[in-house]
């Protein structure tokens, strides 16, 4: 046993639990913890410019690499309330992050002390556990329980609130004999898996819906093996994108109202059986339950018992960690395949591939200002197969899901349910901190980009280079498109005549914020693009600048002001708005047609 402050014990426990990186903003009420971090020196720290930014950095850090748990730290009061958006985003997508806040001394609680707020109560709805530690001797076990909860069952975030005097108090603690608690994950039984496969075998046109739980469980390899053993096509959800490569013969496209493919929706509507694994039947994926479920039988596998039947009641439900379930699915299916006891699926898979080949959206526009569809075409053609994309919400993200290609798990990093604007920059920095060598490209519309643009200074200060594509139409594009239903275009214009724009700036003068100047003022590099033929040189230049200076490089692409992106109210009623591809050359992708520059 050794005598130490409770704050020192907290740092030692985090070290034992595998924490090597934290993100945060110090302040008076959390300084004892920062003093312990400084003394021990084994947990690196990145200083955010906004505490919400630190929480999104922690999210990106967790999402990037299997087994990571991002840690964000802030002082009392507004630091905790600033973290709520990050906690919500992590909670919604089953992402474990640990938020640590300082707090007023215990004697000052509930007395309206400076920056003293009941963050425990405020954060409870968006955490697996939120606790204000009131006894110093509980600190080591509270941190131990936090990591246990974050990793067990459905993953999620935890907030620990530490009063100043609790952090400073001396306690006895033996770190040498400390061990993390065993992680609990429910596992399917063989009988359950055999029943599910029997139901699948009875179907004529089955599909697998692959959700983000497969990514969380690091089970994408098993998903592909199961699909190949059975010959069943796969529909990934937005959070499951990358579990099977976009060009795999059994990848049948994404389904949904917005972030979907024409061929994915058509294949879902043609199916008669769906096996969902690690997914939550999100409304942007399903549309109305009546349309989505009509004529189809469903089996649902999820790690969280209360998720089964939450949106609709499946014909059969299995509570299981995705990896545990898929290991048994593979074992049973491969044995049945070897014994010749699985149905032949080549005709059905062939129908799905034909839809994927022919039901394409047009991307090969040559107008100036550029249409966003052409931007994504250029990105597909000029970023390599192992590129990791980071994005949040808006028409930029919806179009990205419709037109970009992802080939590996954890190479589409997106806050799927919460969708907070401003998420992209800090999340990308967290991804870069987790993996210094990954080919990393972030994607934002101009409004998302402006929300937390100050975090670019973090990338410059801490040498966290990546490429950020900003598609600029000077609009809240998704909201403008939604306002069509109200016959208005109200409070969504970002354009104004910038009095500081150069006289020869042309169209940019009327687009409002000069992102080039702001980016460079924050210590990063920026390039502006107007035409599709400028995209390839801009990307190559950005790669060179990133390598030379080790800072984020922004490529701003000036778009036409109004482009409506395909979406609808039901998966069988998508409004395409723009012309569809008439042939493969009109919609060039790495999958369906020859590459074009």
Image: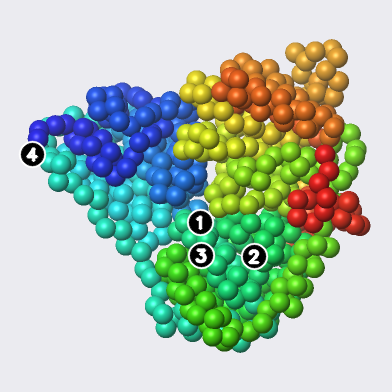
Q: Position of residue 515 (x, y in %)?
A: 69, 23
- In contact (CB < 8 Å): disc 2 and disc 4: no
Q: Position of residue 507 (x, y in %)?
A: 85, 24
| Residue 77 visible in the snapshot | no
Mark 3 or mark 1, which is nearer the start of the sequence?
A: 1
The residue singled out by tag 3 in the image is 222
Q: Check disc 2 and report its element: helix, strand or loop.
A: strand
Mark 4 or mark 2, which is nearer the start of the sequence?
A: 4
The residue singled out by tag 2 in the image is 235
What is the image's colouring? rainbow
Q: Position of residue 416 (x, y in %)?
A: 57, 51
Q: Check disc 3 and report its element: helix, strand or loop.
A: helix
Please tell me the numbered disc located at residue 1.
4
Mark 2 or mark 3, which is nearer the start of the sequence?
A: 3
Q: Check disc 1 and report its element: helix, strand or loop.
A: helix
Q: For the N terminus, give its image quadrant.
A: top left
Q: CA distance from mark 4 to mark 3?
A: 45 Å
Q: CA distance from mark 1 to mark 3?
A: 11 Å
Mark 4 or mark 1, which is nearer the start of the sequence?
A: 4
Q: Residue at x 78, y 32 (%)?
A: 535
Viewer-nearest residue: 436 or 203: 436
Rate crowding at label 1 as few (under 14), some (14 to 19) or many (20 or more) other CA atoms within 10 Å. Answer: many
| Viewer-nearest of discs 4 and 3 | 3
Q: Residue at x 46, y 65 (%)?
A: 322
The residue singled out by tag 1 in the image is 215
Rate crowding at label 2 as few (under 14), some (14 to 19) or many (20 or more) other CA atoms within 10 Å. Answer: many
Left-right relation of 228 to 259: left
Q: Residue at x 41, y 32 (%)?
A: 23
| Residue 437 visible in the snapshot | yes
Q: For the C terminus, give its image quadrant.
A: top right
Q: CA distance from mark 2 to mark 1?
A: 14 Å
Q: Check disc 4 and report its element: helix, strand or loop.
A: loop
């Amino acid at each position: 046993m050794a005598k130490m402050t409770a704050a020192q014990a907290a740092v030692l426990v985090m070290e034992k639990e595998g924490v090597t990186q934290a993100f945060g903003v110090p302040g008076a009420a959390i300084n004892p913890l920062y003093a312990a971090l400084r003394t021990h020196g084994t947990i690196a720290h990145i200083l955010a410019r906004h505490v919400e930014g630190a929480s999104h950095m922690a999210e990106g850090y967790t999402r990037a690499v299997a087994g990571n748990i991002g840690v964000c730290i802030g002082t009392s009061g507004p630091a905790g309330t600033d973290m709520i958006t990050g906690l919500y985003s992590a909670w919604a997508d089953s992402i474990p992050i640990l938020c640590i806040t300082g707090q007023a001394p215990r004697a000052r609680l509930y007395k309206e002390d400076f920056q003293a707020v009941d963050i425990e109560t405020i954060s409870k709805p968006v955490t697996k556990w939120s606790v204000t530690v009131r006894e110093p001797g509980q600190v080591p076990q509270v941190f131990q329980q936090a990591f246990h909860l974050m990793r067990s069952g459905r993953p999620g975030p935890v907030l620990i609130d530490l009063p100043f005097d609790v952090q400073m108090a001396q306690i006895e603690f033996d770190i040498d004999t400390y061990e993390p608690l065993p992680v609990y994950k429910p596992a399917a039984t063989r009988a359950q898996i055999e029943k599910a496969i029997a139901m699948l075998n009875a179907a004529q046109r089955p599909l697998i819906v692959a959700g983000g739980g497969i990514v969380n469980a690091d089970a994408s390899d098993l998903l592909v093996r199961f699909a190949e053993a059975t010959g069943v096509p796969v529909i990934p959800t937005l959070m499951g994108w990358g579990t099977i490569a976009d060009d795999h013969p059994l990848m049948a496209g994404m389904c949904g109202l917005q972030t979907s493919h024409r061929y994915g929706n058509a294949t879902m509507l043609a199916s008669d059986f769906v096996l969902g694994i690690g997914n939550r039947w999100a409304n942007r994926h399903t549309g109305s339950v009546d349309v989505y479920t009509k004529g189809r039988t469903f089996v649902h596998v999820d790690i969280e018992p209360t998720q089964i039947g939450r949106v609709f009641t499946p014909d059969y439900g299995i509570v299981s960690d995705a990896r545990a379930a898929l290991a048994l699915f593979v074992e049973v299916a491969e044995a049945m395949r070897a014994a010749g006891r699985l149905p032949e699926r080549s005709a059905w898979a062939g129908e799905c591939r034909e839809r994927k080949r022919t039901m394409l959206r047009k991307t090969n526009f040559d107008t100036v200002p550029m249409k966003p569809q052409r931007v994504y075409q250029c990105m597909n053609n000029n970023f390599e197969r192992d590129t990791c994309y980071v994005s949040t919400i808006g028409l930029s993200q919806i179009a990205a899901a419709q037109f970009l290609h992802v080939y590996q798990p954890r190479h589409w990093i997106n806050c799927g349910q919460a969708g907070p604007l401003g998420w992209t920059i800090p999340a990308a920095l967290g991804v870069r901190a987790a993996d210094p060598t990954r080919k990393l490209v972030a994607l934002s519309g101009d409004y998302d980009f402006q929300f937390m643009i100050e975090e670019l200074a973090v990338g410059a200060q801490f040498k966290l280079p990546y490429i950020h594509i900003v598609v600029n139409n000077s609009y809240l594009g998704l909201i403008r498109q939604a306002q069509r239903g109200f016959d208005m275009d109200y409070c969504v214009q970002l354009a104004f005549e910038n009095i500081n724009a150069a006289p020869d700036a042309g169209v940019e003068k009327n687009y409002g914020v000069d992102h080039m100047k702001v980016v460079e003022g924050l210590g990063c590099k920026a390039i502006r693009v107007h035409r599709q033929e400028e995209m390839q040189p801009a990307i190559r230049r950005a790669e060179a600048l990133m390598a030379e200076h080790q800072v984020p490089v922004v490529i701003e692409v000036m778009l036409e002001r109004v482009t409506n992106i395909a979406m609808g109210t039901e998966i069988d009623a998508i409004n395409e708005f723009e012309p569809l591809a008439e042939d493969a050359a009109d919609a060039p992708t790495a999958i369906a047609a020859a590459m074009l520059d």
